[in-house]
Amino acid sequence: MDECFALEAKSEVRHEYYDGELIEMPRETTTANLIVGNLYILLHILFKKMPYLVFSNDVKLMVYRDKIYHYPDLVVIHKVSNHKKYVTDPVLIVEVLSEGIEEVDRENWSIWV
């Protein structure tokens, strides 16, 4: 697993990790990026005085016991969490569906929701 994190750190593209395999992530659309940005601002304001942290795009979420890691568009966790490379205990996960990759997103996320 540490080898995959090291490769990901040097890569110019993001990869999700699925049971030993790195899967290249498609680029985000400008529309999806605007939606995520607006939701981030809203959630950040809503949770500002609460014990939560809001992350967007570049924070890995371990979904299943060191076998599956995804990059959700937004993830909210408790501030008391002590994470460095990835988060494990989300209280909210947001994935904005984009044309062209909607089917992939629905398939990936429907397993966990």
Image: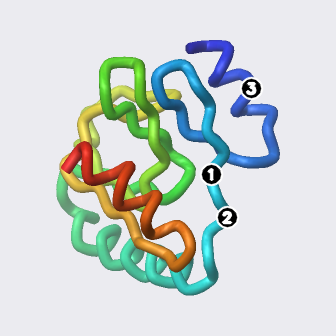
Which one is in front, 61 or 43? Answer: 61
Q: Which amino acid does label 3 sit on?
A: Leu
- In whole angstroms, how far apart are the C-alphas of marks 2 and 1? 7 Å
Label 2, secondary structure: give it: loop
Q: Which amino acid does label 2 sit on?
A: Arg
- In whole angstroms, how far apart are the C-alphas of marks 2 and 3? 19 Å
- In this rendering, is residue 101 above or below 9? below
Where residue 108 appears, as percent x and y from the top left, is: 38, 49
- In whole angstroms, how far apart are the C-alphas of marks 3 and 1? 14 Å
Label 3, secondary structure: give it: helix
Q: Looking at the image, which residue is at 65% across and 21% down? A: 4
Q: In this view, does 45 lie to the left or right of 68?
A: left
Q: How crowded is mark 1: few (under 14 residues within 10 Å), some or many (20 or more)?
A: few
- In this rendering, is residue 12 above or below 11? below
Q: Looking at the image, which residue is at 43% across and 65% down? A: 103
Q: In this view, does 113 lie to the left or right of 88?
A: left
Q: What residue type is labelled 1?
A: Met
- In this rendering, is residue 24 above or below 98? above
Residue denoted by label 1: 25
Q: Looking at the image, which residue is at 36% across and 54% down? A: 107
Q: Does label 2 or label 3 sit earlier along the sequence?
A: 3
| Tags 2 and 1 touching, CB below 8 Å | yes
Q: Name the image quarter holding the N terminus.
A: top right
Where residue 29 appears, as percent x and y from the top left, is: 62, 77
Residue denoted by label 3: 7
Where residue 60 appears, as percent x and y from the top left, is: 48, 40
Residue denoted by label 2: 27
Q: Residues within 10 Å of mark 2 (few under 14, many from 20)?
A: few
Label 1, secondary structure: give it: loop
